[in-house]
Amino acid sequence: MKKLFLTSIAFTLFFTSCRSLTSTTYIKGNDAFILGNNKHGEFSVRLKNASKTNLELWRTPIDGGQNSPVTVKPNETVKINVEKNTALKIENKANEQATVELLVKGDTGLSMGYKN
């Protein structure tokens, strides 16, 4: 019984520590994708710009404002750490559709949506 209990704890710890999600996301021209515009814990994003144009990343606290801009060039991959209750805004200022490949780790209970 004790062995089963310890195995259950190890199994739970393994899966809660490996919370992640992957996504290929498309962003229309002159639009933005917002990840985490809700109450949540910290998370990190590995983002690859699979587009032909630059993308702008912003940290946007859910209580207002935006800060820490990052420009991601075509085929460039960056890792962004995002604080508790802060969204990541991925902005496509080009006229053509953008494609991003995302790997999100940490709190994955994040809202996702578009904003033009």
Image: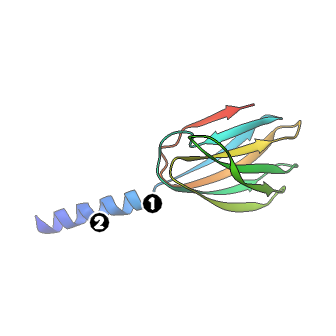
Residue at 57 percent of width and 41 percent of height: 62
Give the percent coordinates (x, y) of residue 93. 84, 41
Toward which corner of the image does residue 2 lie, by quadrant? bottom left
Up the image or down, 74 lies above or below 39; here it is: below
Toward which corner of the image does residue 29 lie, by quadrant? top right
Which quadrant is home to the C terminus? top right
Cβ atoms at labels 1 and 2 below 8 Å apart:
no
Residue underneath mark 2 = 10
Residue at 73 percent of width and 50 percent of height: 57
Instruction: Tell me which amino acid carries mark 2.
Output: Ala
Give the percent coordinates (x, y) of residue 87. 60, 45
- Badge 1 marks a residue whose secondary structure is loop
Q: Which mark is residue 18?
A: 1
Give the percent coordinates (x, y) of residue 90. 72, 45
| 13 sits left or right of 30 in the view | left
Give the percent coordinates (x, y) of residue 22. 59, 50
- Badge 2 marks a residue whose secondary structure is helix
Instruction: Tell me which amino acid carries mark 1.
Output: Cys
Residue at 46 percent of width and 55 percent of height: 19
Answer with mark 1 or mark 2, whichever residue precedes in sequence. 2
Between 34 and 7, the residue placed more toward the observer is 34
Toward which corner of the image does residue 92 lie, by quadrant? top right
Q: Looking at this rendering, what residue extends furthest in the top direction?
A: 116
Q: Which mark is residue 87?
A: none
Q: Distance of mark 1 from mark 2, alpha carbons?
A: 12 Å
